[in-house]
Amino acid sequence: MCGIWAVFGSDECVSSQCASAMKVAHRGPDAFRIENVNGFTNCCFGFHRLAIVDQLYGMQPLRIKKFPFLWFCYNGEIYNHRLLRDQFQFETQTEMDGEILLHLYDRFGIQKMASLLDGVFAFILLDTANRKVFLGRDTYGVRPLFKSVTDDGFLAVCSEAKGLTDLSHALDTPAKIVPFLPGHFEVFELKQNGKVQSVQMEQFHCCTKEPAHAIYDTVERLSTGFDMETVKTNIRTLFENAVRKRLMAQRRIGCLLSGGLDSSLVAATLVKLAKVEKLPYPLQTFSIGSEDSPDIIASRKVSFSLANVSPVSSDGNITVYLSPPEMKNSNFNPFRSHTLFILLPIG
Ligand SMILES: NC(=O)CC[C@H](N)C(=O)O
């Protein structure tokens, strides 16, 4: 995960709004930072980090020497960041996947920047030199983003709506909180008093169109045609590539198993690729359910067969049993000490 939060043009002293930033603390167990924007004292960023790459220099809001006027906060992974860096010969300061957005923005502007990204992301980019704020979200809306704008230009943004509900502003009418549209970016003009005005909302990609980054992708060429063998080969190529690109994580990766076809295939492909890519640890799987639930029984079987592929391919399965009251409690987090994805960093 990672939790992002920002306010622009706060009527209240920003320090009193910051308690709202802490409402998404569960999204980032590694570190948090709240940073006020110098020159715009009623603007502020909040960030909770689950570090995936560049643990040391990847803290946010990300700022680099080359672009001192840019402030960048995002939740997500940019799978093609190295490819784009090499393609356009950018000199990067960190190993952070998100740093690529700053270089792309500087070279090509926001529209091309967003459409060149292969990844899952929700971002807030502030350009104090050009007095602009940009918001954006990946095509499928994998990463969440909510915003709230008042009629007089107070903008608040957060990964979850709960980070926006208790913010105060000068108007009598409550500010509406809306999800940010997937596949879009929005441009706001930043006024000298820190308030904003939306000037552009645009779709940069929709899932029925070839993404702009495809011309740089390294995935092997897909054959054309609809005969069964071609279709199967193409699905296999795309599926393997989808798992491979997620191995960019520098954290230990694990798998959440439901025991069904999807998660079992991801886990099996991961075991295969882990050997090729020489991941220096065995795969840990997790499953969750009531005792004797079909999910748990099936997950155990999958984990057992993965362990049989090779002695180092699986660390076995961590199973969490839920009691009926726990299953009804939507706030219950059985993996408090781990953070989960279907491919998840656990180290
Ligand atoms: N969890 C995230 O959103 C991670 C952000 C970024 N990719 C990092 O490694 O820190």
Image: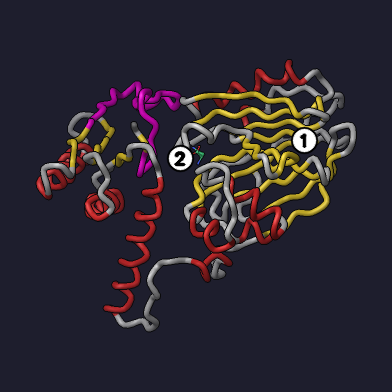
Q: Residue furthest top?
A: 16
Figure coloring = secondary structure
Name the residue carrying label 1: 155
Q: Position of residue 202 (x, y in %)?
A: 72, 58
Q: Amino acid at mark 2?
A: Val
Give the side of residue 267 with respect to residue 345, left or right: left
The residue under the point 40% across, 75% down is: 221
314 vs 112: above or below: above
Q: Looking at the picture, tell me which residue is in the foreground, 62 or 261.
A: 62
The residue under the point 81% across, 26% down is: 42
Q: Position of residue 184 (x, y in %)?
A: 66, 54
Q: Position of residue 156 (x, y in %)?
A: 73, 33
Q: Dot 1, how many residues are within 10 Å of its Cα: few (below 14), some (14-19), or many (20+)? A: many
284 vs 23: above or below: below
The residue under the point 23% across, 50% down is: 271
Q: Looking at the picture, tell me which residue is in the foreground, 90 or 114.
A: 90
Q: Amino acid at mark 1?
A: Leu
Q: Position of residue 192 (x, y in %)?
A: 90, 35
User: What is the number of the mark on residue 273?
Assistant: none
The residue under the point 21% across, 40% down is: 282
Name the residue carrying label 2: 53
In the image, residue 303 lies in the stretch drawn in magenta: no
Q: Looking at the picture, tell me which residue is in the foreground, 73 or 94.
A: 94
Q: CA distance from mark 2 to mark 1?
A: 29 Å
User: For the residue with label 2, is its CB less than 8 Å from the closest atom of ligand 1?
Assistant: yes
Label 2 residue SS:
loop
